[in-house]
Amino acid sequence: MYAREGVELDRSLLAKWVGHAATLLQPLVETLRRHVMSATKLHADDTPVPVLAPGNGKTRTGRLWVYVRDDRASADMTPPAVWFAYTPDRKGIHPRQHLESFNGTLQADAYGGYQAIYETGRVTEAACWAHARRQFYELHAARPNALNPEALERIGALYRIEETIRGKPPDQRRAHRQEHARPLLDQFHAWLTTTLETLSRKSDTSRAILYALNRWEALTRYCDDGQLEIDNLPVERALRGVAIGRRNYLFAAADSGDECAAAIYSLIGTAKLNGIDPEAYLRFVLARIADHAINRIDELTPWVVANQLRSPA
């Protein structure tokens, strides 16, 4: 952007600016975190990020964790938001710390680090049908057979039901799923169990079937709770910006760089969820936050600023 204007800026200077901005914006990021963690249902995931190890010039792998609050699909107009957090590794202690104030249902993948959180009893697991589907889809793409298309069609039927109830209130979604999805789930479970008996346990298709059967209770929990989604796609959408970023930079220079990135990703992602241009939002906030009263920091959240940016001048 600066280059188009004929302005040459050193990358290290730009990185310092981002760091200073992230520090200035930290109270606002903390407000987003509290808003996200006050939900009763969250989507969660994590992704690797390269970071330069101090001293030896080599890179190591850190993690960006992402938590999304977005219940618009179940007719809840509470402002959606996303919170990113960086950690230097993928140990289970990190999501436990992130979620220590959360009580509700966590829609996530099968990462083992979440198990200790579920065992507390205050967080309920909901699994992701997109992950289960992917097991069969990747097998079919690599080595087509008659079984994988059958599984894909059965899962596809569950998704077609979801298309008819998006945006409906939880009680209507639950009733519709009980009438239409529950019988299909029962039939699918019977098919998976019967099919597994005909296969070697070492086969790839067996592993795909066991992935679903071993998580069946968590996979079908959405059918009993109209607030839940069938999959974890809201959080995968939130990670697209990170994936694009990885294709455009080599690594973060230090853990602090990825911590700053997590802060900025949180603000940009939440701005997008609330339908406003991230650049316009950051420009608005950075021009005001230094002189803004900390006890009124909520006034600078994306969903509040959105109303001001949309209002005619």
Image (tube, grey):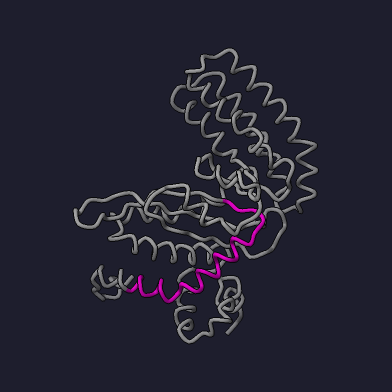
Quadrant of the image containing the N terminus:
bottom left
The residue shown at (55%, 78%) is: 297
Work out whether residue 40 or residue 118 is closer to the camera in this orientation and state it: 118
Q: Which residues are magenta?
A: 17-43
| Residue 175 x %, y % | 80, 43
The residue shown at (71%, 59%) is: 76
Which residue in the rendered view is the most extreme toward the top? 198
Work out whether residue 121 or residue 300 is closer to the camera in this orientation and state it: 121
Which residue in the rendered view is the most extreme toward the front? 120
Residue 80 sits in quarter? bottom right
As drawn, is 52 to the left or to the right of 241? left
Q: Is residue 6 magenta?
A: no
Q: Is residue 23 magenta?
A: yes
Quadrant of the image containing the C terminus:
bottom right
| Residue 178 x %, y % | 78, 38
| Residue 119 x %, y % | 60, 43
